[in-house]
Amino acid sequence: MSSTDHAPETHDAQATAGPEDAPAVKPVLTPAAAKRANASVIGMIMALLVSLLAIVPVVLLSAGQKTDTYRPAVDVAAVAANAKPVAGFSPVVPQLPAGYSPNYARWVSGTSDGVSHWDLGYLTPGQQFVSVEQTASANPTWLADQVHKAPTTGTRDVGGVAWTLYDKPGTEKSYVATIAGTTVIVSGSAAFGEFDAVAGAVAASARS
C-alpha cells in the first residue's frame, strides 16, 4: 500500500486595509477660491488703513486743543439785589478786572451756627479760588470756623482798609475786616496779588 504525500497548501495572506490605514485626504484649494481668499484679506487690510487714516487727524486735533475751564454764568448784582431785603445790609458786589469769574453768589440762612451771611466765590486768573463772606451777625465761634481756626499773623492795608490776616500752613489764608457795620472775610488759596485784588474790590463795594 503506497502512501500519498500531500504537499502543504500555501495561502497568500492579504491584509485587509482598515480605516486607519487609508491615506489622508488633503483639501485642495482651487485657484478661484485662493483668489477670493486673497482678495478678502487685502480688502480687510485696506479698510483698516482707511479707518486709521480717518482717525489719526481727529486724535491729533483733539490733543492740540486746550480744554477751557467751565465758567458758570452768575449775575452777582442780581442775586445781591434779591438778598438785600433779607440781609438788612447791602451785599458787596465786587467789580473785578478781566480774568476773575464768579462761581456762585448766594444768601445763606438757617444754618446751625445761627449766622446768616452773603456768600460769593470767584475763580482767579491763576485758576485759584477765593471766597467772600459778609454778615452783620458775626460771633467769635463763627469767625474762628470761617478762618479754619488759623491764628492772626499780621495786617494788610488793602483798598484803604486794614485787614487782619489769618494764616497757618496747610490751610487757606483769610483777610478779615469790619466795613460799613458788617464783618467781611476773604479766604482762599490764591497768591497775595490776586487776594489783594479781590479784597480791594470788596472794600470799594462795601463803602459805596
Image (tube, rainbow, N blue to C red):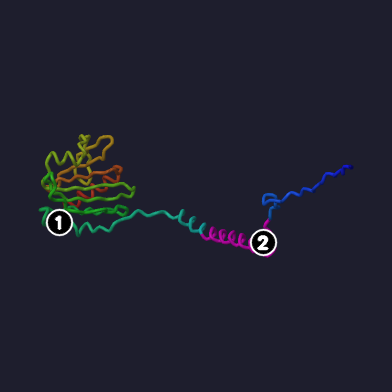
Q: Position of residue 59 (x, y in %)?
A: 48, 56
- Residue on which disc 2 sits: 34
Residue closest to the far front: 1
Instruction: Name the side, left or right, on which 86 lies relative to 165.
Output: left
Q: How many marks?
A: 2
Q: Which mark is residue 203?
A: none
Q: Nearer the viewer, residue 116 or 88?
A: 116
Secondary structure at numbered mark 2: helix
Q: From what the image shows, is residue 129 above or below residue 151?
A: below
Mark nearer the viewer, 2 or 1: 2
Q: Which callout, 2 or 1, points at the residue further toward the start of the chain?
A: 2
Instruction: Please tell me how crowded label 2 is: few (under 14), some (14-19), or many (20+) other residues with Cα within 10 Å.
Output: few
Q: Is residue 118 above or below residue 191?
A: below
Which stretch appears magenta? 26-54
Residue 37 magenta-highlighted? yes
Q: Is residue 201 above or below residue 33?
A: above
- Residue 83: give its label: 1
What amino acid is found at the position of numbered circle 1 in the picture?
Answer: Ala
Residue at point 66% right, 63% down? 33
- Residue in the image at 15% along x and 49% along y: 117
Q: Residue at x 11, y 57 (%)?
A: 85
- 6 vs 132, nearest the viewer: 6
Q: Position of residue 6 (x, y in %)?
A: 85, 44
Q: Amino acid at mark 2?
A: Ala
Rate crowding at label 1 as few (under 14), some (14 to 19) or many (20 or more) other CA atoms within 10 Å. many
Q: Residue at x 27, y 58 (%)?
A: 73
In the image, is 19 to the left or to the right of 156? right
Tag 2 near tag 1, CB within 8 Å = no
User: Residue 41 at what x, y percent from top left?
Assistant: 61, 59
Q: CA distance from mark 2 to mark 1?
A: 82 Å
Of the 4 image quadrants, the one containing the N terminus is top right
